[in-house]
Amino acid sequence: MLPYNWMMAVAILLPVVAAILIFIIRQYHVRGLIVILAAIALIVNSVLFLLHGKDTFSPANAQMWDMVVTVLDYLILLFYIYVGISLKNWLVLIFALTQIIPLAWFEFGMGGRAALAQVNPTFVVDHLAIVMCLVISIVGSLICVFAIRYMYDHEHHQHLEKSRQSRFLFWMVLFLGAMNGLVFANNLIYLYFFWEVTTLICFQLIAHDLTKEAIGNAARALWMNSIGGTAMIIAMIILFANGAQLSLNAIIGGGVVSAVLLVPVALMCFTGMVKAAQFPFQSWLLGAMVAPTPVSALLHSSTMVKAGVYLVLRLAPAYAGTKLGIMIALVGAFTFMAASGLAISQTTGKRVLAYSTIANLGLIIACAGINTPLSIAAAILLIIFHAVSKGLMFLNAGAIEHIVWSREIEDMEGLAAKAPLVTVITGIGVLSMFLPPFGMLLGKWLALESASSVVPLAAWMFVIASAATIVFWAKWLGRLFQVLPKLGSKIESLSLSYSVPLVALVLCIFGAGIFVAPIYTGFVQYAVADVISSGQALAASGWGGLAVSGISPVSSTANFPIGNYPVWPLFIVIAIAVLIPLIFIAVKPGELRPVYLCGEQVGGVDADEWYSTADAKVKVQLGGYYFQGVLGEAALNPWTYTLSIVLMVIMFAVALLAMGGAL
Amino acid sequence: MGIIATSRLKSPWIMHFDNSSCNGCDIEILASLTPLYDVERFGIVNMGNPKHADVLVITGPVNKRTARVLKNLYDQIADPKMVIAVGTCATSGGVFHNCYNVLGGVDKVVPVDVYIPGCAARPEAIIDGVVMALQKLAKLQGVAL
Amino acid sequence: MNAWIIAVITVIVAPFIGGLLAGIDRRITARLQGRFGPPILQPFYDTFKLFGKNRIAVNWGQFMWIYFYLLLMITALLFLVLRLDILLLMFILGFAGVAFALGGFSSKSPYSHIGANRELMQMLAYEPVLLLLALGVYAQTGSFMISQIYASPTPLIARLWPIFIALLVILTIKLRKSPFDIATSHHGHQELIKGIMTEFSGPYYAMINITEWYEIVLLLGIVSLFVATPGLWWLGIIIALAAFVLELFIDNIAARMTVGWMVKFAWSVGLTLCILNLIWFWVFAKGVS
């Protein structure tokens, strides 16, 4: 066991040191080794946090660290101004100015610095933060390990003259430290600082390939997230003006905040929503897909966007039972529904994953807005399961891209014959997103069961979204497995840097899925209690009438009045369904028949051509259904932008009206 | 096995293939499927797909192009299967047996179990032929029809 | 009675009931069409014959997906019979359909591919209604457990009759009856060959049939839940059988429609009825009945 300040240093500062080393050392293998060592250190450290439990921390030399944070804050904002000017991107410039000017005035003009220096403790590590730390450290580190070989192949394919892998890995590893700092932060200026660091790294990584498109999309991510940063600064100013202490503990510690403080809470939730790419701010996440796949996996599915939902979830006690909470739930639910529908029309694998990510983040935010113990439990479980499954899916997309050298789903047809191992892992990833009894479906089921009584409109949107998610996942999975009748495809060889993270994430999916009940009772329920009882005195009522037993599906109404989710019986059914054919069915070559082409197939059993008129040979061509006329972005976006802007306006209006009523 | 053998006799699913027939026999086959003759009461269903069929019902003489297709379809039917050649053309080539592109009757390409002559073969004859095929199958399996 | 005994009896008896219903289906359809039709036991003859066929395949994956389909359908039926969570039942039923669609996708066959895509569109059409049905049950009984439906004094149909009508609409889709026999059809081979089922044969075609028999029993069981108060359960079964015969009539008077029309119809009629029903609950009848 390490002393606590060492654990904090490993979590936040070790990545900084490792990143600098990676940047300096340009040799492929040594650099990879440093990444792996840092990964191991972070993972072990996060387990130590789990074992240590809830705690708080303030750095010893507080004044020095405050100074560091302040200086770096302004350096980052000045850098944004520089980016805006040099790219002639006025939105970047404007939203950098809207941050730096109010911040400077607040800190130095209004006396904010003194108030911030008095915040104690600086870092709070409760069970929710530990959950986030585990997710960041485990999933994030695996993605960085994947990136070692991935970026090598990436640059190889691009025939780059001067390698930029060191720069890439520098930002990736640095990001892990920033995320850890973000989830531990209690002092609002520290929270803001780490938030801005993640925005900065997001900008650098999206722009990594230095194409015009990449830089443009990076700039868009920058100015949109700067709007979020501006909102956070305004929230700080309003809090200070109303005499509230500038820490998360103070905001949520008293239960539902007084009506005057609902506006800063709404602003901070807005910041979280922008970072989580909720509608109408989803375009930055979609644009971020041009970046190399490890960026999409790390930032834009498992970790950075989780910071956004983390903040909304963290603030849940502050808006519990208010109309603001209901509006937050509706914003999230609408995003879930709209993004799921739009995902059906996407032809690029990564855009499907992006829309799915946005949708699931909307679901988590909706659960936070619904604000019952059940829905908070759903939100936390969804964070865990989504980070693991979506991280795996993006890594799979990267591996597939390096096999077929394309990102289009249509080019992935029949991948099961070319690359069985990656295809099976991708299949597991896709199935884990919507197959019972895996964790994502458990989370969705919990969300539906908890929403029905509290915000039914959200429940109805969940229902429509659930139907849509089935369609686009099954469609994609089907294309991957569409093969000709041929036996004996060889299992392809993968570099360890690819296969170890992939297999590790698969094991995490199964482990977390099968043992979800012990994970909940042993750990997650404390996180739920931390979120809910931060202010309210609430007995940890556990599941509130549901049971996720893995042992017996038979229930008596006395024990399980609302619902029941037998985990292990369902896993056993799935296992039987997979194992029986695997063990007992071996297809012999004599049993193969060609696919039915009306008898006109050319050649033998694995024919993929047929005789057309005048005996001309025509290739069999299959295409996916995308419905772009009905579900495409051009068709739906006028509606989604309008409705989502209306919902956000109502969200702020509700908070303003409450504040006006109280004043 | 007894019940499976009996079931084979009570559920012969057909696939109907027209080699290069004038459609006369095809119309008679389809007439058998209509409510007037109603062969579905014998369990006969017209599946369009060789993978689902037990009995291949063929009309028309075999020419060089359809020989390839007919062989393909015959190979795609799972055992046990029967083949019925309907009409004089399918039996022997009929009036076309001398044409430069006609190879002859269907049995030049696939083994035939029952021949139903006629031009066009009547639905009663077709039903009779199917019953004969089932009797042949029954004898092969050693069950009573 | 012991849950294990109920489960075993269900697994053994349900396909027989489903097969008989399928046979009655063909008989009544034939009589409506002015002909005699096959004997009622015909589906069993078909199934045994199919088991006697030699195995042919187009790939290995299709077998695994059919096992998924069959086992998940049995699981969903057991959820109903053992009176467990209805929302989870709908999710399992949904994934059973996906497994079938993936079986159709598993080979590079044009007919199978179109059939599988259409099967997904069918799911898009009916899945929201099924999930909203579960929400409706919760709105009326205060619980998602089917055991609560049997314990509550008011039958579901008293306050959930719009959802019941929506259920009848999607029952047509689930039973693959015209106008919604779009992914595969009992008589559609002019258009699709056999759609999603084109590349299955022999024993595995038989397994799909058996799975559909389980599904018939499951769906009629869900219909019968609408009148499930103690003492009136027999009325629920009669209503379920009446719904089945209604579907046969609809099948014989309607022609197959397009995929787009099906989704639009199911959403505009089914979804609207469900949401109006739930809005009524939210506005007028908050709380448990």
Image: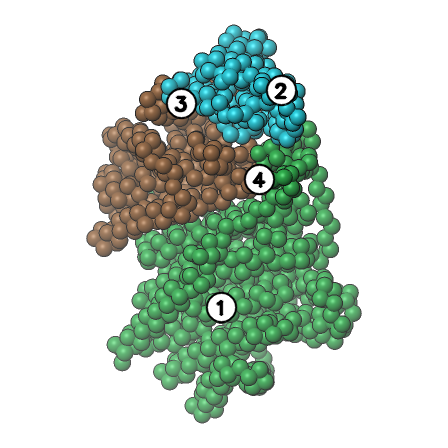
Query: Residue A554 lies in what quarter of the image?
Result: top left
Mark 2 → mark 4, Cα distance in angstroms: 36 Å
**Residue C132 placed where, x, y %?**
34, 48
Position of residue A603 relative to residue C123, above or below, is above
Count of residue discs: 4
The label nearer to you, 3 versus 2, is 2
The color chain C is rendered in: brown
Amino acid on which the number 1 mark rests in the picture: Ser
**Residue A450 placed where, x, y %?**
37, 54
Labels 4 and 1 within one chain: no
Position of residue B125 relative to residue B62, above or below, is above
Whether the residues at callouts 4 and 1 have beta carbons within 8 Å, the answer is no
Q: Chain of mark 1?
A: A
Which chain does green denote in the image?
A
Query: Residue B36 lies in what quarter of the image?
Result: top left
Q: Chain of mark 3?
A: B
Which residue in the protein does label 4 denote? C109
Q: Chain of mark 2?
A: B
Mark 4, other Cα within 10 Å: few <14 / some 14–19 / many ≥20: many
The residue lying toward the viewer, choosing from A376 and A120, is A376
Q: Chain of mark 4?
A: C
Which residue in the protein does label 2 denote? B97
The residue lying toward the viewer, choosing from A61 and A635, is A635
Taking B64 as reference, is C171 left or right? left
Give the structural element (helix, strand or loop) at label 3.
loop
Taking C156 as reference, is A341 left or right? right
Taking A154 as reference, is A427 left or right? left
The label nearer to you, 4 versus 1, is 4
The label nearer to you, 2 versus 4, is 2
Mark number for residue A283?
1
